[in-house]
Image (cartoon, helix red, strand yellow):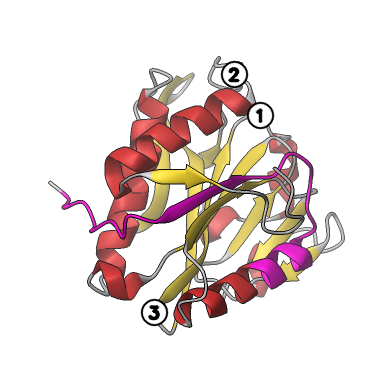
Amino acid sequence: MTKRLENSGDIEWAIRDDLISYPTALDVMAKRADDIRAHRASELIWLIEHPALYTAGTSSKATDLIEPTYLPVFQSGRGGQYTYHGPGQRIAYVMLDLQKRGNDVRALISNLELWLADTLDAFNIKGQSKPGRIGMWVQRNGKHGDLEQKIAAIGLRVSQGVTTHGISFNVDPDLTHYRGIVPCGIQNYGVTSLADLGRPVTMTDVDIALRASFEENFGRTHSVADPATGRN
């Protein structure tokens, strides 16, 4: 059983209702990470959505960008390979002080996977983590046997003890947009979403489940304004 990471007791939780550009989000995360390191700000979980785009992680391979002109492509600075972001996908940017949590990146990844699995469980979906395939997977029955499809991705950057980036959770994105990349560099597996699995829930439903599951695995949070705009 994965040990729950120590909670600092002061994690902020913010939700942005409209789309935010990827460069703007990177700037907000970088500033917040600096402030956390300098003890000027609390840890933060920031829930957002991006316009349709691809991001390239530090391990991305040029051959995994199948259609380079299909959507805008951004270098991310996070670990991992190519991934897709777009409307209908809930992204949770995770800005945590890892030094308060034992400097254990593997434990953090495990807790993020538990967070996702518990969130899926709230919608009666069994999520699974797979060795060598970071993220959250579901198993479905197909015409030619069982299929494993990815419903959520994890990609982190840890710099001077503070994390940025985080998770992306497919609620109801346009799954055809994945055609331009090999998601996370993993061949022969599909992608899915809550809507694709027959769960037509709202983003608000997902946000409620994400917060409840996060607090089970990481500890309590309190709501704050969107760090990009200062608006609730």
Please state which of the two labelled residues, at mark 3 or mark 1, is closer to the viewer.
3
Q: Which residue: 73% across, 54% down?
A: 230
Could you tell me how far apart the alpha carbons at marks 1 and 2 are, in whole angstroms? Answer: 9 Å
Q: Position of residue 197 (x, y in %)?
A: 53, 20
Label annotation for residue 49: none
Q: Position of residue 16 (x, y in %)?
A: 69, 44
Packing grade of label 2 (10 A; few <14, some 14-19, many >=20) is few
Q: Amino acid at mark 2?
A: Val
Q: Amino acid at mark 1?
A: Asp
Q: Position of residue 229 (x, y in %)?
A: 77, 55
Image position of 117 with respect to 201: above or below? below
Magenta residues, as a range?
2-28
Image position of 201 with respect to 1: above or below? above
Q: Determine if the magenta segment contains residue 24.
A: yes
Instruction: Please state, as top left, top right, bottom left or bottom right, where the C terminus lies in the image.
Output: top right
Q: Which of the two residues, 146 or 30, is positioned nearer the viewer here? A: 30
Please state which of the two labelled residues, at mark 2 or mark 3, is closer to the viewer.
3
Label annotation for residue 172: 1
Residue under numbered circle 3:
161
Q: Which of the two residues, 193 or 28, is positioned nearer the viewer here? A: 28
Residue under numbered circle 2:
201
Could you tell me how far apart the alpha carbons at marks 2 and 3 are, in whole angstroms? Answer: 36 Å
In this picture, residue 75 sits left or right of residue 162: right
